[in-house]
Image (cartoon, rainbow, N blue to C red):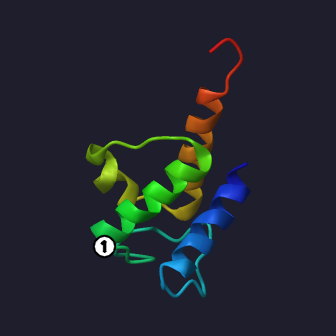
Amino acid sequence: MSSEISTFVVESLKEMNYDVEGITETTTLGPAGADLESLALAELTVRVEDRFGVTFSEDEAEELAGMTVGEFAAAVAARANLLTAPGE
């Protein structure tokens, strides 16, 4: 599921008019990589929340900006798995 999420993240960035050439699993979302400003990061998280049924709090924005695409995808996958875990 993590690779599906990473692909979705890159496609979303492309739709948001970001240059996605060279973005990989190891590219950070914040200033050192994809250079998403806070509004763009908020838009990305809303897109991910809508697509994968997970939620992020506003307090997590700084932490998310420091994540790589792969780390972000793994965090989304973990939350999605928690939501769909048997017995929940």
The spot of residue 30 in percent (x, y) is 37, 69
Position of residue 5 relative to residue 7, above or below, is above
Position of residue 13 relative to residue 66, above or below, is below
Image-based side of 29 in relation to 87, left or right: left
Secondary structure of the residue carrying tag 1 is: loop
Say which quadrant the C terminus sits in.
top right
Work out whether residue 9 or residue 65 is closer to the camera in this orientation and state it: 9
**Residue at x-position 52% and y-position 71%:** 27
**Residue at x-position 31% and y-position 73%:** 37
Position of residue 85 relative to residue 41, above or below, is above
- The residue at which mark 1 appears reads as 37
The spot of residue 54 in percent (x, y) is 52, 41
Work out whether residue 2 or residue 66 is closer to the camera in this orientation and state it: 2
Q: Residue furthest top?
A: 87
Image quadrant where residue 33 sits: bottom left
**Residue at x-position 62% and y-position 73%:** 11
Mark 1: few/some/many CA within 10 Å (<14, 14-19, 20+): few
Work out whether residue 61 or residue 49 is closer to the camera in this orientation and state it: 49
The spot of residue 46 in percent (x, y) is 44, 55
The spot of residue 7 in percent (x, y) is 68, 66
Image-based side of 1 in relation to 80, left or right: right
Type of amino acid at the residue the image marks with label 1 = Glu
Image-based side of 68 in relation to 43, left or right: right
Q: How many marks?
A: 1
**Residue at x-position 66% and y-position 27%:** 84
Q: Residue furthest front?
A: 50
